[in-house]
Image (tube, helix red, strand yellow):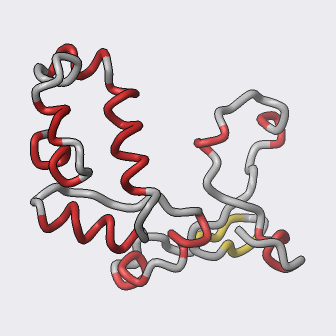
Amino acid sequence: MKGLMRLIGRPDRVSDARFRAYGVRRDNWADMMDGVEAWSRQIATEQCLAALGAEGMPASAYRAVAEALRDPQLAHRQALPDVEDESGLYAAGLCHQAKPELADAEVPGHLYACFHPIQMAEGLDA
């Protein structure tokens, strides 16, 4: 926490009672992260990751599904294999709603990181 606050230009927060101990820091997490986000928005993602890495802080960027699907490391590791079922072959990371009875189910959006391949054929970006 000390290194992060120093990195974002807020060393004063190290002694701030809202952030000094873990328990109260959790209670004030949104305030602390507002400062981190304000800092990170001022620089490119690559610069942010490099600065955090230089301080020994593990970090990764949030990526859109399409960006993640183009990740060369994922391709190299074959982390997203093509899938074939009775309705056809689906490219790595792309899938369809296999069970029609679930089509109207309320499922959190973050559970669906896949798209029907027809979208790709119609030029819609994943």
Q: Is residue 27 above or below residue 108?
A: above
Q: Which one is in front, 2 or 104?
A: 2
Q: Is residue 86 above or below residue 16?
A: below
The residue drawn where x is 40% and y is 27% is 30
The residue drawn where x is 77% and y is 70% is 117
Q: Residue furthest right?
A: 122
The residue drawn where x is 51% and y is 62% is 63
The residue drawn where x is 23% and y is 50% is 9
Image spot of residue 87 (x, y percent): 78, 66
Q: Is residue 65 shown left or right of residue 4? A: right
Image quarter hosting the C terminus: bottom right
Q: Which one is in front, 28 or 119?
A: 28
Q: Say which quarter of the image contains residue 110.
A: top right
Image spot of residue 71 (x, y percent): 45, 78
Image spot of residue 119 (x, y percent): 83, 69
Q: Is residue 57 above or below residue 119?
A: above
Q: Is residue 100 shown left or right of residue 52? A: right
Q: Say which quarter of the image contains residue 34.
A: top left
Image spot of residue 48 (x, y percent): 32, 65
